[in-house]
Amino acid sequence: MQPPRRFDLLNFFYGLGAAIILIAALFKFLGWRAADTLFIIGLVGEALIFIISGVQKVGVRRSYPWERVFPQLKETSERYDITMGEVQTAQHQQVQQIIESIVQMNDTVAKLNEATQRLTKTVETLEKNYDGVTQATLEYQQEVNSLKIKIAAANEKLQEFEKYKF
């Protein structure tokens, strides 16, 4: 629960000066009289408030109990003594893990390269087969066209033959 807030007189005058300047701007935009006077009053008031706030005494800052959040800050807290051997062991384990990760990554990259090469060979084979199928299709189409011409010629001969009735 927060303590009740007290009225801050300096903050009130900050707001009052700003309000006077805004009203003066409104008067100026609308072309009303007294705009210049309101601007002068507002700006002088703001200047006085800035002067007063510049020499205002600063209150005592509250000290927070950081030891509750970070027990390491307590003077009586236990200190952890770590030996150089423990540090070197931990570093050695981390380096070993990094090396294992690099070896696994190297194996994965090698497998990926092999798969890429197989895929490339498959695509090349498909291209060759596609060219062969395309050529065969063209030849088939030429044969069908030739057959159409021959059938049309045979139909013409048959119609001529039907003219001669026996």
Image (cartoon, rainbow, N blue to C red):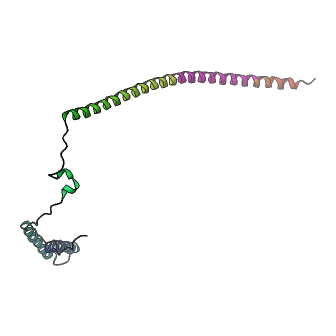
- Measured as percent of width and height from the top left, residue 34 is found at 15, 78
Residue in front for this viewpoint, 17 or 60: 60
In the picture, residue 109 is in which quadrant? top left
Q: For the view shown, which residue lies furthest in the right direction?
A: 166
Look at the magenta stretch and give its main secondary structure: helix
Left or right: 42 in relation to 147: left
Q: For the view shown, which residue lies furthest in the bottom direction?
A: 33
In the picture, residue 11 is in which quadrant? bottom left
Say above or below: 87 vs 20.
Answer: above
Magenta stretch: includes residue 159: no
Q: Residue at x 15, y 61 (%)?
A: 63
**Which quarter of the figure is the N terminus placed in?**
bottom left
Q: For the view shown, which residue lies furthest in the left direction?
A: 55
- Measured as percent of width and height from the top left, residue 52 is found at 8, 70
- Measured as percent of width and height from the top left, residue 155 is found at 80, 25
Residue in front for this viewpoint, 138 or 76: 76
Q: How many marks?
A: 0
Q: Which residues are magenta?
A: 124-150
Left or right: 156 in relation to 64: right
Say above or below: 58 vs 20.
Answer: above
Q: Residue at x 43, y 27 (%)?
A: 112
In the picture, residue 96 is in which quadrant? top left
Left or right: 90 in relation to 63: right
- Measured as percent of width and height from the top left, residue 125 is found at 53, 21
Magenta stretch: includes residue 146: yes
Q: Residue at x 12, y 75 (%)?
A: 41
Residue in front for this viewpoint, 12 or 166: 12
**Which quarter of the figure is the C terminus placed in?**
top right
